[in-house]
Image: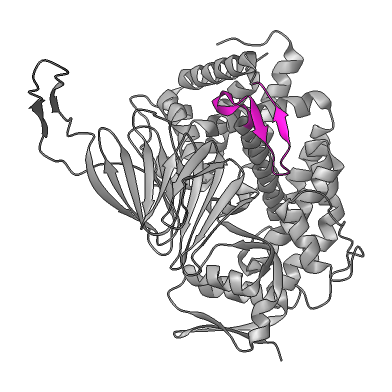
């Protein structure tokens, strides 16, 4: 399995994996002892083997999803790091699990980028010093800030208008972090009813800005 | 509620919502993802799906506002993961009146008769259990995220917000209030918020402060002047060595624990072992001293200390023996 060597600034996930599994520079082959013969033995082998089989499909999926092949590569690397820490024996539907893991990785990366952008605009700082010591002039855009606030206001207003049960399901699933099954049990409805409610809420979100 | 004029857009929103809801389900299948991938190929579909995702991320920025918007007479109760501060009540304090009786010249007369509102002030202790981290919301909108086993005392005063970190690691998201400084105290060291998001790690021998957003000012007996830290820098105060070091860092690594992970870039096993030891009650040792100098780069999921040690050992081709006396790394035979 080929792992691209990541150069440039410190992105821990990609650089970390390269360094750990790349004792010979730039070839990217995993040394046989590195992962597959972990303490969980058979289970880890199973999930890693599945990952290797599906790797190309995962890269293709996340390339479509993010619009960037290099982003997809980074995401799929991170999936590998995460499954290494896993006891795979309990996972039903392991392939779907890999896709879900990757989706979480993708969203975490988006969150980090958003935070970095927000950090640069925050506190009206006229200049931001980067770790290399260079200063970058960045005046925060007043229009962007206002637009963001108005967008959030519209979003909140849309949520407030949703029917009671829909609001309840959305709160429990998205804000309280309950699974569909847990929400269903809590409210005494079927899982598909929960899914339909989420769909109704998400549809409203999707229709904003149109 | 405005509905879009264009049925194609409306259809895309409906489908995007359906896909989003389907894939968030625990029983989504590989087939679902593959069919979703095909649906995503159409740029309109992808744009609509992205809009839903962006809206959900926007909500994450202000979950309290989201909760308020979503609440109504039938609202679901808030989850137990975020606990509002409930200070112990103190009797109202009256700050006395001073009268400076000087002669003709400058007679300063302070009449400070203030009744402090007991509902906001007081001291409270917060502790995170050894097996879970906790987030606490403070009355001013700031929040404290305690890592496993950490403990703080919050001293909420009219003119100061003082937090004492008695043990462990915490990250702070501070709402700036120039009239009311936010100060974190660890032993003799003080971290003064200048409007920030920062992480504080207190171990037996050292204090490490990493700033993600804004700036803090750190005072320590080991440095002659207060140290101003901007975003993207960290200070390490090593009490054992008596040294203070400031360096540029990627702050997300220091905050990775808040997402349940520890991130390492060329760290020695000794360093990683010291971190793992903080998540368990027992010491971590090496059968041979040269093992401690091996380097590790990667990501460890935070878990029970024994589990973390076993995964690390597996990764490194070593062996970890975990028992009641502690954790021991040795060469795999």
Q: Nearer the viewer, residue A150 or B115?
A: B115
Q: Quadrant of the C terminus of chain A?
A: top right
Q: Is residue A38 left or right of residue A194?
A: right
Q: Give the residue drawn at x 43%, y 68%.
A: B204
The structure's colour scheme is one colour
Region in magenta: A120-139
Above or below for B105 versus B176: above
Residue positioned most to the right: A27
Q: Nearer the viewer, residue B48 or A18?
A: A18
- Residue B279 visible here: no
**One can see residue B197 in this view:** yes
Examine the rendered structure and indicate whether residue B295 appears above or below residue A165.
below
Which x, y percent locates residue B82?
39, 43
Membership of A125 in magenta stretch: yes
**Residue A125 screen position, x and y as percent:** 59, 26
Instruction: Indicate whether residue B124 is drawn in magenta.
Output: no
- Residue nearest the viewer, comparing B273 with B223: B223
Q: Nearer the viewer, residue A59 or B36?
A: A59
The quadrant of the rendering that contains the N terminus of chain A is bottom right
Q: Quadrant of residue A5?
A: bottom right
The residue shown at (60%, 47%) is: B233
Q: Position of residue B312 (x, y in %)?
A: 64, 73
Image point 55% across, 44% down: which residue? B211
Q: Residue at x 39, y 33 (%)?
A: B141
């Amino acid at each position: 399995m080929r792992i691209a060597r990541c150069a440039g600034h410190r992105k821990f996930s990609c650089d970390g994996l390269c360094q750990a599994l790349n004792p010979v520079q730039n070839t990217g082959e995993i040394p046989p002892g590195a992962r597959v013969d972990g303490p969980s033995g058979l289970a880890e082998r199973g999930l890693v083997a599945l990952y290797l089989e599906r790797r190309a499909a995962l890269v293709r999926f996340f390339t479509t999803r993010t619009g960037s092949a290099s982003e997809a590569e980074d995401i799929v690397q991170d999936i590998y790091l995460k499954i290494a820490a896993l006891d795979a024996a309990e996972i039903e539907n392991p392939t779907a699990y890999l896709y879900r893991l990757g989706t979480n990785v993708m969203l975490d990366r988006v969150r980090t980028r958003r935070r970095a952008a927000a950090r640069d605009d925050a506190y009206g700082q006229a200049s931001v010093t980067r770790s290399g010591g260079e200063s970058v002039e960045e005046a925060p855009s007043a229009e962007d800030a206002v637009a963001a606030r108005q967008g959030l206001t519209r979003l909140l207003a849309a949520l407030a208008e949703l029917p009671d049960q829909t609001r309840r399901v959305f709160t429990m699933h998205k804000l309280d972090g309950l699974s569909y099954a847990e929400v269903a049990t809590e409210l005494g409805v079927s899982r598909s009813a929960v899914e339909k409610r989420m769909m109704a809420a998400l549809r409203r979100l999707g229709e904003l800005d149109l | 509620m405005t509905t879009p004029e264009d049925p194609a857009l409306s259809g895309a929103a409906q489908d995007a919502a359906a896909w989003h809801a389907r894939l968030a389900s625990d029983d989504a299948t590989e087939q679902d993802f593959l069919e979703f991938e095909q649906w995503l190929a159409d740029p309109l579909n992808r744009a609509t799906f992205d809009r839903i995702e962006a809206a959900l991320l926007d909500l994450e920025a202000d979950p309290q506002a989201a909760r308020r918007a979503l609440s109504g007479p039938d609202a679901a109760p808030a989850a137990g993961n975020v606990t509002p501060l409930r200070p112990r009540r103190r009797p109202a304090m009256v700050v006395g009146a001073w009268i400076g009786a000087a002669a003709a010249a400058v007679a300063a007369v302070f009449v400070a008769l203030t009744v402090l509102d007991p509902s906001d002030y007081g001291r409270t202790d917060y502790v995170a259990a050894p097996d879970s981290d906790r987030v606490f919301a403070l009355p001013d909108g700031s929040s404290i995220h305690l890592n496993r086993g950490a403990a703080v005392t919050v001293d909420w005063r009219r003119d100061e917000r003082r937090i004492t970190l008695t043990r462990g690691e915490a990250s702070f998201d501070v709402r700036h209030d120039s009239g009311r400084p936010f100060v974190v105290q660890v032993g003799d060291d003080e971290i003064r918020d200048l409007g920030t998001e920062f992480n504080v790690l207190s171990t037996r021998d050292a204090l490490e402060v990493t700033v993600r957003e804004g700036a803090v000012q750190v005072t320590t007996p080991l440095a002659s002047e207060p140290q101003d830290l901007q975003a993207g820098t960290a200070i390490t105060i090593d009490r054992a060595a008596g040294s203070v070091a400031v360096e540029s860092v990627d702050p997300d690594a220091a905050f990775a624990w808040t997402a349940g992970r520890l991130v390492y870039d060329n760290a020695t096993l000794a360093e990683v072992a010291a971190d793992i030891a903080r998540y368990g009650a027992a010491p971590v040792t090496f059968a041979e001293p040269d093992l401690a100098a091996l380097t590790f780069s990667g990501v460890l999921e935070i878990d029970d200390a024994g589990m973390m040690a076993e995964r690390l050992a597996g990764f490194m081709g070593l062996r970890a023996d975990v028992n009641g006396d502690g954790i021991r790394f040795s060469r795999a035979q």
